[in-house]
Image (spheres, rainbow, N blue to C red):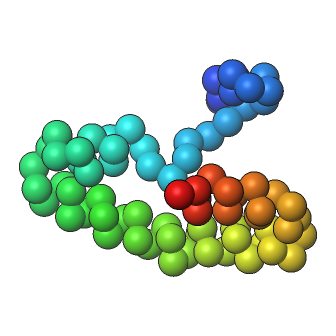
Amino acid sequence: MMMPPNDKSGMATGRGLLTEYERECLAGEHEKQREYETRSRIRSRLDGPLREDIEHLREHDPELLDEIREVVCDE
């Protein structure tokens, strides 16, 4: 299956940290239980796949990790 192109580079992209449905849940657009479940799923990603990705970038591409830090840690 082909992903839609990214407006910036023409390359295929996936999603960021949240799906559209998760954004809706966190915004209170669905029942409260869905919001709790969504928070739990996101925490699992933070402690699992995202942590692993950060460790991989730390070892193999620290410059790209710095770019991520600029986005995440922007005040």
Q: Is residue 61 visible?
A: yes
Q: Is 7 above or below relative to 37?
A: above
Question: Which image quadrant for residue 63?
Answer: bottom right
Is residue 40 positioned above or below 18 on the image? below
Of the 4 image quadrants, the one containing the N terminus is top right
Residue 72 higher or lower than 47, as above or below: above
Percent position (x, y) of residue 14?
A: 62, 40
- Dividing the picture into quarters, in which one does residue 51 lie? bottom right
Residue 53: quadrant of the picture? bottom right
Q: Is residue 48 left or right of residue 61?
A: left
Q: Is residue 37 left or right of residue 51?
A: left
Q: Is residue 2 visible?
A: no
Residue 30: give x, y in percent of width and height.
15, 44
- Seen at 69% across and 22% down, the residue is 7
The residue that appears at 16% across and 40% down in the rendered structure is 29
Q: Residue at 62% across / 53% down in the picture?
A: 71
Q: Return the x and y of residue 55 as percentages of the image width and height.
A: 74, 77
